[in-house]
Image (cartoon, rainbow, N blue to C red):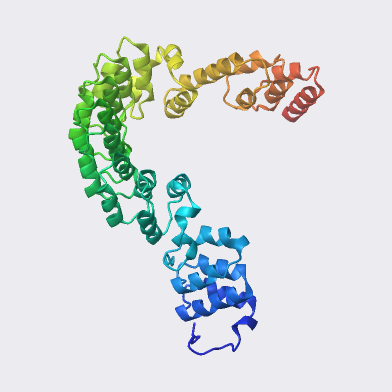
Amino acid sequence: EDFDDETDFWEDWEDMADDIRCSLALNNNSSDNIFFKLANVAACLEDMSLTGFLVDNPKTNSQALAIAYNATGQDDYAFVQDKLIEHPNLPVEELEFLQNMESLWDDECMENWLLEDPNINTKLLEKIATVYTSLRVRAAIAQNPNVPIELLKNLIKDDEYEIYLAAAKNPNTPIEILQQLAQHNSSDIRIAVVQNPNTTLELLGILAKDNDTSIRAAVSINPKLSQNSDVPETSQNLIEDDNCEINLQAAKNPNTPIDVLQQQDKHNSSDIRIAVAQNPNTTIESMEILAKDNDPSIRAAVLINPKLPLYLFEQLYSEISELLNYLNEEDFETLVERFSKDKPEFNTFAFHYRDRVYTSQGILPSFRRFVLLLHPQIPISILEKHKHSLQWRERYAITQNPSTPTEILQQLAEDANCVVRTAAQKKIEQQT
């Protein structure tokens, strides 16, 4: 840290130990003078490792980068170029290959590169914009996340659809440009604005009133609406939309205001009523209405609501077998976790239900049924049912269940499978 680079600590930098040179090349505190000397050593010795370390260091100055690169062997150009083009101090005007880039990369290659590499040096992007006149390349520059704002503004002045669309897709396009693009007559461009992460809630609110259904639909699924509760007017507009799909997305939004959802608990669309039934913002009053809906899929959806009170669950429990036909396994297990302690008979039902589901999946060995048969709270009737299972592993699981009665163990102690038989006999011995 105390090294004075104006005084040659080493008389001959070429004789300096490789690891010391490389450490200096990677050190962010090395001065421009040190980088300059290291670059000359790398050029003289054709040391690609040292050149690579210089290019890796974001503090290496442009003069040193130019010296190191211009002395690079032909076989190693690609290795250095790939790193160099992303360097913040890229010496754009000093590198020979950048002066003839249009002869090295045609429009298609340049376009693909611009779209695939989000870290291209900003000065290089400016250079490309002055060299290439192709619309496809200029649009790709506008879409590159690293494009300087002033360059983006100049590209937009081309007044080309492709550039407008590319700018709308750029995740770093500033809001003032997005506001201009939101007024474009192309729906594709306005949809791209809706999907842009920089688009504000205020602008989404404006686009939620767009005459084009596709724009409003894009707003309805924008993640910002589900992550922010301060959008009641936008939610109201979407849920009252003439388009059913837009209504549905608004009904699914967990931040749709309570009063807006209450207006939809009697909607004529069953899909929307299902979405309202599952929405965590839905009131208990609306859940009570939906729990009496004529459509069983709506009543089943109420069961999924994370704020479902116990008394409503008990009200629906009488038809639980039918309603479970509309739920997936994850929903069912969530219900068991929430309500089995308060309603013990539901826990018993759950074991029988799982057993029925696993059995319906076939007679092939089932790890899930194996685990089920090991559960100490499983009803004895299920153990009794599977003591003659065709799968010896399931019979073995019964022998390992601490709740298995001695009578069942005695029967398994005479099992044809030696593993099951031995396990059952050992259990009986432990009991006695």
Residue that appears at 35% across and 44% down: 135
Residue 270 x/y as whole percent: 31, 15
Residue 86 x/y as whole percent: 46, 59
Of 281 and 238, nearer the camera is 238
Relative side of 129 to 56, left or right: left
Q: Quadrant of residue 408?
A: top right
Residue extending farthest top = 294
- Residue 140: tell me if it is visible: yes
Task: Look at the picture and state if 126 lies above or below 248.
Answer: below
Task: Look at the picture and state if 154 lies above or below 251.
Answer: below
- Residue 340: tell me if it is visible: no
Q: Quadrant of residue 278?
A: top left
Residue that appears at 58% across and 22% down: 378
Of 96 and 298, nearer the camera is 96
Task: Look at the picture and state if 363 lies above or below 194.
Answer: above
Residue 118 x/y as whole percent: 43, 51
Relative side of 103 to 258, left or right: right
Residue 320 x/y as whole percent: 43, 15
Instruction: Report the number of numbered marks.
Output: 0
Residue that appears at 20% across and 37% down: 205
Of 190 and 93, nearer the camera is 93
Quadrant containing the C terminus in the rendered view: top right
Task: Look at the picture and state if 24 lies above or below 204.
Answer: below
